[in-house]
Image (tube, rainbow, N blue to C red):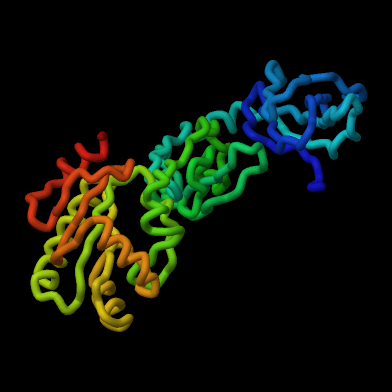
Amino acid sequence: PKPFQLYEHDVACDSITLSWELRSGADCYEVQYRPTKGGTEWKKMSEGSSNYVRKKNLNQDTEYSFRMRYKKNGNYSEFCEPLTLKTLSMELVQSRMAQPKVDVIDGVSVRVIFDRPPRTKKSEVQIKHEDGAGWTTVSTEVMSGSVKKRNLRAGQGYMFRTRGWNRDTDSWGAFSEPTVITRTKMLHPSFKDQFGELLQDRERNMITTDHLAGKVVGVYFSAHWCPPCKMFTPQLAKFYKATKDAGVNFEIVFVSSDMDGIMFRNYLSEMPWLAVPFRQMSRRAKLRSKYEVQGIPRLVILNSKGKIVCEDGARTSLSPQQIQNWERE
């Protein structure tokens, strides 16, 4: 089994919060602590089923050691290796950045937003999964007040914290208080039924369909050889950019009617959105049949639950506000 260990979750001047990964079949977890210097006797801190625990009323700028064991089938395990942490001094407390905010974008990405104190040269952002494992660094070179974290798992919970590098002290400040658990969006099952597990972008990268979670989706039936399509696609790209600039959760999936892969790739290179891979011919045919496509260009718009909200956006006057209204349905 994976080694059992404690992880730091948050450190303040008078409290320390710990976490750990739950053990299969464990009935409860016992956490003990003692001051690192002069503390010979371990004291029970908590015993329960949660994998997060906070010890309050500690002395500031003081080192403490923590250890834990779990009970399974009435028997206790050995204690894990002690974890030593130091509460913050008042100087470090003053260096703490404010708790970040998190905007969920879709099923695989979020944006972490935070205030940068004066004299901050750069910021570090860390992420932690709700399962209680340790913090992982997203970046130590964030030069603005936000960062986008991609490649997350749909429907999973994450927390974030930040700290800044101060120009005057030429050192890192203390980490902020962690955010509460923020969940990425869940993709409605109908989208994977239609599009499968993976879509393709114009750079030939394969993108998980979870990227569509929580978004209004335009299913764009078009082809390189179609003159009306060649006229409409630049207009659609301009509208797509306008929705992104307005912060609207809108995505487009191109369903090609091209006859060969070269034409498909050339046409997709003009598009800033996703596509059903060309090789998935049967899937593309099923989509044309499902939406009864008789002519192209055709833009079928679905809300985040997969319901048709517009039969043909190619012949409808669209606005970012209208997309936002459909997003709320």
Left/right of residue 101 with respect to residue 12 in the rendered view: left
Q: Position of residue 91 (x, y in %)?
A: 59, 30
Q: Quadrant of residue 41?
A: top right
Left/right of residue 267 with respect to residue 124 in the rendered view: left
Q: Residue at x 60, y 48 (%)?
A: 136
In-front residue for pair 61/84: 84
In-front residue for pair 247/22: 22
Res. 250 in view: yes
Left/right of residue 149 with respect to residue 132 in the rendered view: left
Quadrant for the C terminus in the image: top left
Res. 118 in view: no
Q: Position of residue 84 (x, y in %)?
A: 78, 36
Measured along the vertical axis of the image, is residue 82 above or below residue 205? above
In-front residue for pair 317/170: 317
Measured along the vertical axis of the image, is residue 229 above or below residue 241? below
Q: Quadrant of residue 105?
A: top left
Measured along the vertical axis of the image, is residue 43 above or below residue 307? above
Q: Position of residue 187 (x, y in %)?
A: 41, 45
Numbered-mark total: 0
Q: Residue at x 74, y 27 (%)?
A: 62
Q: Residue at x 76, y 30 (%)?
A: 63
Q: Residue at x 48, y 37 (%)?
A: 183
